[in-house]
Each structure stands twice: as C-alpha cells, then as structure tokens.
Image (cartoon, rainbow, N blue to C red):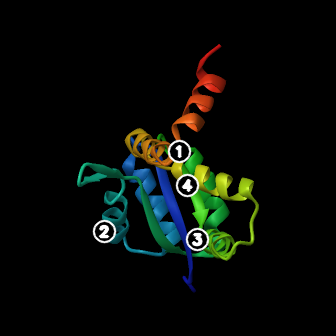
C-alpha cells in the first residue's frame, strides 16, 4: 500500500463519537489503532491559547472517497483538503499567477477553517493595515443601513 499523498483534515465541530472517527482515520492512513487514536487526539487541542483543529496525514488514495463519505456520518464537522492541490495553488499565487479574486478566495477558504478567535484576530490584523478612509467606507457600506 503506497501512502505518498497527503491530506489535511480540518475539524470545525468537535467529534462526540471519537471511536468512529479513529476507525475511519485508521482505514485511510493504514495506521494501527493506537497510532490512529494518537493522531485523532491532536485535533481540538489547545496550544498557546489557540485551538488546533487540523491534522495532516499520509493516506491511501483508493479509500479517500469512502473516508469522506464516512465522515459525513460522524457527529463532528470536517473538511478534507488535498495538500498537493493547496501547495500548487499557493505556488501559482506566490509567483503572481492569479487574479485579485483568486488571492481573496484562497485566503477566505483558509481562514474559514479556523475557530472564531483565530478569525477575529485575522480580521483585526487585516483591517489594521487599511487607511482610516477605507475603513470608514467599509463600515458605511456594510453596517450603516
């Protein structure tokens, strides 16, 4: 079984039935039960005040679709991202091969994978870079009815 491909599993809502998630993780990674459990334990752990809600794993491609299907039956909410596609997108954008919209869309997708505290901090960081006149325009357009 070749496990050269990587995916990132993002958990948006905590899993209530961890055993099922561990079982599915075991199947897609070809890990033993203990290793799959240890990997699952890395999700939703707080480090330096921030929640870790994603893990990156090597996976067996033939069972990826089944894994995604099985996750829909879990109580947690998950997104599965192919890291090769993500890396390719980042490389293209980093050398200037992308429209403004593609940059915005990529950043929005990445930020939306995190918890509300991370998103709030990110928005504050972005807005602090804008000039006051631009902030006033945004405020008037979106919050003043």
- 26 and 79: which is toward the camera: 79
Q: How far apart are the alpha carbons under marks 3 and 1?
A: 31 Å
Q: How far apart are the alpha carbons under marks 2 and 3?
A: 25 Å
Q: Mark 3 or 4 closer to N-term?
A: 3
Q: Mark 2 or 3 closer to N-term?
A: 2
Estimate how packed mark 1 is, as few (under 14), some (14 to 19) or many (20 or more) residues with alpha carbons within 10 Å: few
x and y percentages locating residue 70 in the rendered image? 58, 52
With 64 as the anchor, is 15 left or right in this view? left
Question: What residue is shown with label 4?
Answer: 110
Question: What residue is shown with label 3?
Answer: 83
- 59 and 106: which is toward the camera: 106
Residue at 30% across, 50% down:
50
Residue at 46% across, 68% down:
56
Residue at 65% across, 13% down:
145
Q: Nearer the viewer, mark 2 or mark 1?
A: 1
Q: Nearer the viewer, mark 2 or mark 3?
A: 3
With 27 as the anchor, is 85 left or right in this view? right
- Determine contact: label 2, label 1, CB under 8 Å: no
* Relative vertical location of residue 127 with respect to residue 83 in this rendering, above or below: above
Q: Nearer the viewer, mark 3 or mark 1?
A: 1
Question: What residue is shown with label 1?
Answer: 130
Estimate how packed mark 3 is, as few (under 14), some (14 to 19) or many (20 or more) residues with alpha carbons within 10 Å: some
Q: In terms of secondary structure, where does tag 1 sit?
A: loop
Q: How many marks?
A: 4
Question: What residue is shown with label 2?
Answer: 34
Q: How far apart are the alpha carbons under marks 2 and 1?
A: 48 Å
Q: Mark 3 or 1 closer to N-term?
A: 3
Q: Mark 4 or 2 closer to N-term?
A: 2
């Amino acid at each position: 079984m070749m496990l050269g491909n990587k995916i990132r599993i993002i958990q948006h809502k905590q899993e209530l039935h961890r055993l099922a998630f561990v079982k599915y993780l075991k199947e897609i990674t070809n890990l033993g039960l203990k290793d799959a459990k240890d990997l699952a334990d890395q999700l939703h752990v707080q480090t330096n005040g921030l929640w870790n809600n994603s893990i990156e794993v090597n996976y067996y491609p033939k069972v990826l679709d089944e894994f995604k299907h099985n996750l829909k039956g879990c109580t947690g909410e998950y997104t599965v991202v192919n890291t090769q596609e993500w890396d390719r997108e980042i490389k293209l954008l980093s050398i200037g091969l992308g429209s403004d919209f593609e940059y915005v869309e990529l950043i929005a997708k990445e930020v939306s994978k995190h918890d509300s505290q991370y998103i709030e901090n990110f928005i504050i960081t972005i807005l602090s870079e804008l000039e006051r006149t631009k902030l006033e325009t945004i405020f008037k357009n979106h919050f003043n009815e």
